[in-house]
Image: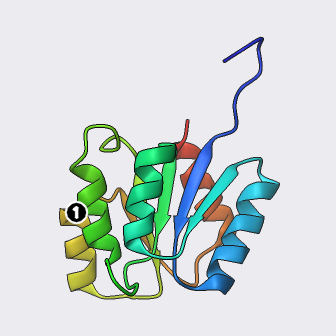
Amino acid sequence: MVFGFKSKKKILIVDDNADTVEILKSLLEKEGYKVLVSQDGEEGVQIAAQQIPDLILMDINMPGLRGDMAAMRIRGEASTRHIPIVILTGVEDVQEKVLASQAGVVDYITKPYSPEKLLIQIKRLTQ
């Protein structure tokens, strides 16, 4: 905090669906968050290491590096292991939830989701 001003919290969205990214980006920017975007897991890992976001919203099924594997890599680095990761996906599957949990994600939210509930969870995790 400098001169009483709080810096904007940074949220990284990792999702290969452009529509999902735009909806989330718009929602988050209206709430005052700085939004970073990646379209795949590999790039998401790199952005997380470079930008150190306050929270990551990540899809599970993406081309290349899946969300659970990207989460494991983020958790494996000292500089990024503290970042909360929320899986936000259309996949309602117990095995996917288990894999995400084993990868260290803090929540697994399925689409369609309530924007209000999502924002409450984001605020809680970025305090």
User: Is 38 rendered above or below residue 81?
Assistant: below
Res. 24 image quadrant: bottom right
Which residue: 23% across, 61% down?
A: 72
Which residue: 63% across, 80% down?
A: 20
Location of residue 26 in the rendering, given as x and y in whole percent from the top left corner? 77, 67
Location of residue 11 in the rendering, given as x and y in whole percent from the top left corner? 58, 53
Residue that numbered label 1 is attached to: 103
Amino acid type for the residue under numbered disc 1: Ala
Location of residue 94 in the rendering, given as x and y in whole percent from the top left corner? 24, 84
User: Is 29 rendered above or below residue 18?
Assistant: above
User: Residue 104: in sight, yes or no?
Assistant: no
- Few, some or many C-alpha atoms within 10 Å of disc 1 (few <14, some 14-19, many ≥20)? many
Q: How is the image coloured?
A: rainbow
User: Is 114 rendered above or below residue 85?
Assistant: below
Secondary structure type for disc 1: loop
User: Residue 28: in sight, yes or no?
Assistant: yes
In the picture provided, is 82 more to the left or to the right than 56? left
